[in-house]
Each structure stands twice: as structure tokens, then as C-alpha cells.
Image (cartoon, rainbow, N blue to C red):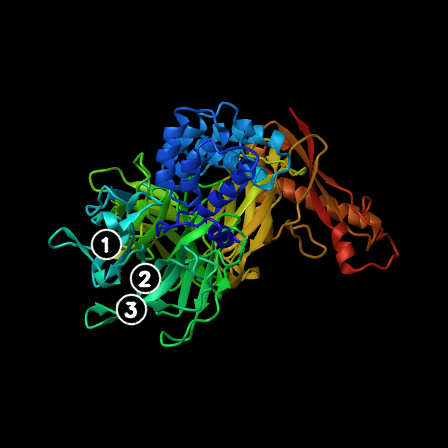
Amino acid sequence: MILHNINKLNSTIIHLKIKWNIVCIILIFVFLNTFSFSKINACPRADEAFDRLLFSIAIQEYEKCLKNNNTDLISLQKLATSYKILGNYKMSFLTYNRIENKEVMSIACKIEYAYLLKTLESRIKALEWVEICLKQHSGHPQLLTMKDVFSKEPDFEENSKYQVDVAPFNSSFSDYCPAIYEGKIIFSSTRLSTKTNFDGYTSENFSRLYYYDTNRQKVLPFAHELNGQYNIGSVAFLNRGKEMYFTKNRNNVNNKNVASFVILVSKNNNGKWEEAVPAFIQEENYNYVHPSLNQVGTKLIFASDKEGNNRFDLYLCERISSNEPWSTPKRLPDYINSVEDEVFPAFLSDSVLVFSHESPDGLGGLDMFTTRYVKNDWTFPVNLGKPFNSNFDDYGIMCDDNFLQGYFSSTRDNDTGDDNIYSFVKIPKQYFDLTIEIKDSISGQPIKDVGIVLVQENLQNIVYKTDSLGKAFITVDKNNESGIIIAYRGKLLKTLKSSEIYSDKNDEAKISVQYTSGDFLISGTTKNETGNIVPDVELAFTEKQTNKSKKVTSDKTGEFEISAKPNTSYEITTLKEGYFTPVTEINTSNFSRKEGLNINTSVKVEKAEPNKIFQLKNIYYDFDKWDIRKESMSELNNLISFLNNNPDVKISIDSHTDSRGNDNYNTWLSQKRSESVISFLANKNIDLSRIKARGFGEKILVNDCTNNTECTEEKHQENRRTELIILSVE
């Protein structure tokens, strides 16, 4: 469709860059011409140049004509369009501003003006203009997209890792699309041609190939045998530079004086470039531009308008080897090819592709995007951001796939719209980002709160801890040889130096460290009976086998952590004024290290209030006896600690039996057992006036296991119990 329209324009040669906006400009032209039939052309000489795509001449003629009629809407729109095509955004914007009533402009010009506002003024002003346009063009899809994008704050921070400079071989003309050939920088330029090589499209010389001699610091012609009365450029090399793919415009297609573009390939024969031939079958009615090849020569990506959808898309040709013919072009997926134009593809490696297109959510003009070929598919394109992209056209990148250094083309930093080549280099960082990950060697589970000390010469050391994922993120001086110390639970795991982990190719490093101790980490929360947090509770963990004890206090959020040996049973007691907790147990033999090192638990502490009943499950007696067994000591010591810590509390020790046996005997036995507890407490200097002993026998059962009722031993055990009753808190 595009070239069908071009064919009607009786055009002359078009600049080889094929500005990305040529398609929408043609649409503008067609739209503007719908008005020209109903009125006499105000600027006929300018219109003729515009119709023939001689935009530089059209600009001169419109400027002359508009001195006498400076309000002609059609002429002003065509003049602004001409400036925009040639990349002179500033003059295009100023020309649009000469139109007093912009609401009568064509919809295409309104959209162009919105982009110019975003580029030269601000996103907010562009949004305000789009909202005005939507009042006239309600539901217009492109305007709606622009409104949605312009409403959001852009997320493009300047990447300070790069230094960008104008390349030393630029001229006052257009220089663009660098490539590497035998260590030389090959690029396209409109410099140094004679007047007979004049391009009416841009008023510049025809585009030629040049190379920069770094030793002589001089620019010299390249492949001059391919030059002619046409533009040539946008090159890609294959087979170690023995083949060159490039774009060239072709004239007189089907005996029509029409400019269109074709991708050619030329072979180097003893230092001379042979006559170029089409790289693959290309339809004459469409444009084929900007070839790019992967390193092994099995993929060729280019831009074309062959879909007839009034825009340039990216296409892929493939082949098994570099000696085979190319396959039929296949359009890349829609998430790469948008409603805008996709142009200037560039393979950085076999799997990394960069291309340019204008996007409402970009920085302005052409922005460069990158996509990767992963598992037989292309990833979603990502904007390269600043400094690679600017508010103007940015395209034609050449670099390695790590973006360490290279060149790209841009119209930034000038008012004329001329293209320049910029060099970029990644600035070596003084610091790099280090991720340290700690895992258990058996379970593979992450370990939190591992201590990491960054030792800094002449500075204070910095202490880090791993998070819940077992990771710590550290910024390290690449010259730091003092070391990084990793330790956990008193054990040194590893020491590191920057030189052992830093790589100039990356600003990031990652190391994994295995922890091989057998200890578990018991972590939990101290809560009351309703599930609310109780802070500042002292917990004692006592090994039943050795009677060794260690303590920890829960923090302000009720959380605590303590290490525990494998295959060990612990009794847990608590101490907090006004609270009591019977002894609980935890046995690490019930946990497998393969499932992780962390044991999560909650410890319930209850308020010691009048009439509150606590069951003391760990007080034991022999059958039919009231002597306290040795296993009861931990619970009794816990009770003593509670009484000493709460001197105003008075208690009763109540003992109960099951229903088996004589009722009177059971009452007597339970009383004797309670008195044994009281006697033990008295021997530990507990005031007898604070404690009572009561035996209830089988009078207060907790279930239905009464006399002559069949019950399991577990049911009878529920009734055999010793309880602590809070009588009063004075």
C-alpha cells in the first residue's frame, strides 16, 4: 500500500536512511491532498516538490510562498511535515505553532504535533493536547493509547554506568549506521560528494560508505566501486567480511521514475567488491531495508512494508548454512511489530537483537529496544533507556551483547536534525553489587541471620545479615582486599577478597556458601491464651539428658530464636512477672534436617489471675505412692521460679485421681500427694502461708470415666492430674 502511494508521487531518489516516519508522512500527504482538489493550490511550486518527495526544496518554496500567505493551513501542515521528515523537530514544531487554530488540522498532523510536544516541551503538555483532540475524535485508538501512556510518569532513569561522546569521525553532514569490518569502523555518510551527487529529498549529497582509519585518524571512502547515482548504506558483513549486505535505492521500477529500496549482497574478490545482486527474492512494489545478520549467517532480519499495512515491520529469513539460499521472509511476532514502524534491526549476537521504533511510552522519536531469542521464541522488547535513547531519533547500534562499548546513531544535541554517530563505553565501577546466599548443605534450605562482616581498610566495618531467603546484598569496593567474613553461630564459614569474585564484565557478583553444622534453629513467638503477643518473656531451654540450660528472651514482637542440637529433648520453661507457663517439651529427633534447619513453634504464657487453673502435667508419682519422682524436678523448679518472681501470689496445689479404687482412699492419696508438693516448696524457702494443699480424689473428674465405667487408660490418665490454682494476687 505504501509503495503504491509512492508510485503515484513521481518521486526522485529518497535518502537511504528511510526515516522511520516516512510512512505516516505519506498518509499525511494523502490526507492533505483530499483538500487540494477543492481549492487552488496556494503554493504550487512547493506542492510540486512535496509531491515528488523533494522535501528540502519544498521547505524553501513553502517558506517563500508563506511570506505572502502565512495562514494557509494546507501549506503550513506540509511545511511542518517536511521539516519532520528531515528530522528537524524544532522547525517542525515552530511551524505547527504558526497555525492559530490547530483543531482544524488533519488527525495525522495532530498526532505528529502531540509527539513533538512530548519531545520538545513536556509529557503533560502532550497529554493536554491529546485530551483536546479526543473531544473531536472520540474513541480514536491511537489517541486513546497516547492518553493512557502520557498519563503515566515515565520510568527512565539515566544510566550513569556509561560515558557517551560524539565519535571523532563525524562531519557536518549526516553520519549514521556504524559497522565493523576487519577492525575498521564502516559507516554511512552524506559528506564529500560532488554537486552531481545531490539528493533532492534532503538537499544533502548521496549517502556513501566510509571507514575511519584509527591510526591515521582519517575518514576514507569504502567500497567505492559500488557507488553510483543512488544512496547506499546500512551494511552488514558475513563470512569474515567476504560478503556485504546493504540497502540501495532503485529507480525506474517498471519504467516508472520511482524510488524504492532493495537489499543487495556483494562478494569481496581479492579486495574488490563484485557487482551486487539481490540478497533474496524481493517484490518490486515494496521496500526492503536495513539488513542485519547473526554471527553464523543463518538468520537475516530486515525491515519492510511488504504487508501493505502502511508501516515498516521486521521480517526474518533463515537458512541452514551460509551457503544455502534464504527462506521466504516471515514477519516477527506482533509484540515486536507494533502499530508503529520497526526499523534498523541489529544483531549483537546470535540471540540478541536491537531495533528501533517510536512508541508513545518511549523517550521521544525513535527509541532502541532489545529482545532475545530464547527457546525458539523472542522475548518481549525492553527499552534500552538513557543514555542510549533520547528525546530524538536513536538507532543503528553496533556493540557486543554485554553493551560494554560500541557506537550508535542519533539526531540528539543539534537543531538541524542531522545524524551523528556516538561512542559509548561502560565506566569501570569502583564498587560492585555482591549477593551472598547461605544454604544448609543437607536440606538446601536458606538460612537467615547469618552474620557477614565487610572489612574496610581505614573505615568502620559494616555488618550484614542474611534475610529470610538466606540472602544478603552488599556493595563492595572492587579493590577491597581486606576481606569479607561470613560466620554463623560462632563458626567461620568463609572469607573472601574482591579480587576472588569481581569480574570486569559484570557489575554484579553472586556466591553461595554451604552451612554444614547439625544444629537446628528453634524460632517462635510468645503468646497468651487468646493468641496475642506477649513480649519480653525469658525462656529457658534445658537438655533433659545433661540438664544443661541456655536462655533467650523474646523481643518486643514476642519473637525468639535459639539453636538446638539434633536428637535432643528440651524442656522449655518461661519467666515473666504476672505470667505462668507449665513446662513444655520439644524433641529435635522428631525433625529431619532434610526438611530444613528451622523449627517453628509458639510458647503460650498465661496471665496469673485469681481462680486461674494451670495443669502441671510433669509431676509424677509411683503407683499408690505420694513420693515425688525425679522427673518432676523441672516442673517443680519452674513453679518455684514463678513463686519467687511473683511474691504476692497465693496458690493451691490440687491433686486428683481417677475413679478406680476406693473413694475414701483416693481422697486420702491425693491429699498426701499435694502435701508432698507443699513440703518440697517449703524446703525451697517458699512461705507456707502462700500455699495450700488440697486432695480431691475422684470427686472432680474431667470426663465420664466414673465408677464401673469402661474407659481406656488414656481417659483415666486425664483424671490423674495435679493442678496449680491461683487463689489471689495481692
Q: Mark 3 points at which residue?
A: 275
Residue type, numbered disc 3: Glu
In the orientation shown, which residue stands out farthest toward the right?
A: 708
Front residue of this view, candidates 214 and 71: 71
The local secondary structure at tag 3 comes to loop
> Residue 179: percent from the left, percent from the top?
28, 57
> Residue 284: percent from the left, percent from the top?
46, 62
Quadrant for residue 730, please give it: top right
Front residue of this view, candidates 84 and 256: 256
Classify 359 as above or below 228: above
Q: Name the residue under label 1.
A: 499
- Label 2 Cα neighbours within 10 Å, binned few <14 / some 14-19 / many ≥20: many
The disc placed on residue 268 is none
> Residue 518: percent from the left, percent from the top?
44, 60
Front residue of this view, candidates 398 and 700: 398
The answer to whether residue 482 is visible is no
Tell me the CA gap for discs 3 and 2.
16 Å
Front residue of this view, candidates 640 and 41: 41
Quadrant for residue 606, please give it: top right
In the orientation shown, which residue stands out farthest toward the left?
A: 216
Residue type, numbered disc 2: Ala
The disc placed on residue 236 is 2
2 and 1 marks in contact (CB < 8 Å): no
Which is more N-terminal, label 1 or label 2? 2
Q: Nearer the viewer, mark 3 or mark 2?
A: 3
